[in-house]
Image: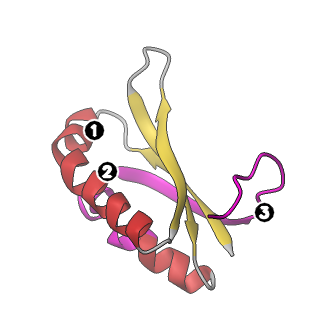
Amino acid sequence: MLFALICKDKPGNLQVRLDTRPEHVAFLEGLHGEKKLAFAGPFLDADGKPNGSLVVVDAPDLAAAQALSAADPYAKAGLFESVEIRQWNWTFNKPASP
């Protein structure tokens, strides 16, 4: 099942995000390779700078989604002010499975 990880950055932590981005991207690439990542990308502020993340993962249950969220290098670096994890149903414009 799919879970949306809705992550809000702590104010004033753009440099933490930038410094940790290479490890975060490698983490997401690993999830993609394991077929656990549906899609991901940053939220942007009014100036177009990243200030949060939306990551949608495929996990068997909430506990597994929480474990994936906690393993994200951004989370480990203390970037996030909050993380909301919600089960999600991809209804429209879902790409066809290969």
The image quadrant where one finds the C terminus is bottom right
Q: Position of residue 69 (x, y in %)?
A: 44, 68
- Relative to the observer, which residue lies in front, 21 or 84? 21
**Which residue is the site of mark 2?**
79
Going 43% across and 14% down the picture, which residue do you hit? Answer: 47
Q: Earlier in the sequence, mark 3 or mark 2?
A: 2
Q: Secondary structure at mark 2?
A: loop
Q: Is residue 96 magenta?
A: yes
Magenta segment: 69-98
Q: Callout 3: few (<14), some (14-19), or many (20+) C-alpha neighbours within 10 Å?
A: few
Q: Is residue 60 magenta?
A: no
- Relative to the observer, which residue lies in front, 38 or 67? 38
Q: Position of residue 32 (x, y in %)?
A: 43, 64
Q: Amino acid at mark 3?
A: Asn
Q: Amino acid at mark 2?
A: Leu
Going 22% across and 38% down the picture, which residue do you hit? Answer: 18
Going 83% across and 48% down the picture, which residue do you hit? Answer: 92
Q: CA distance from mark 2 to mark 1?
A: 7 Å
Q: CA distance from mark 3 to mark 1?
A: 31 Å
Q: Secondary structure at mark 3?
A: loop
Whether residue 27 is visible here, answered yes or no, is yes
Q: Amino acid at mark 1?
A: Asn
**Which residue is the site of mark 3?**
89
Seen from this angle, which residue lies furthest left? Answer: 19
Q: Position of residue 94 (x, y in %)?
A: 74, 52
**Which residue is the site of mark 1?**
13
Q: Tell me if residue 90 comes above or below residue 21 in the rendering.
A: below
Image side of residue 25 versus residue 91, left or right: left
Q: Are marks 2 and 1 in contact (CB under 8 Å)?
A: yes
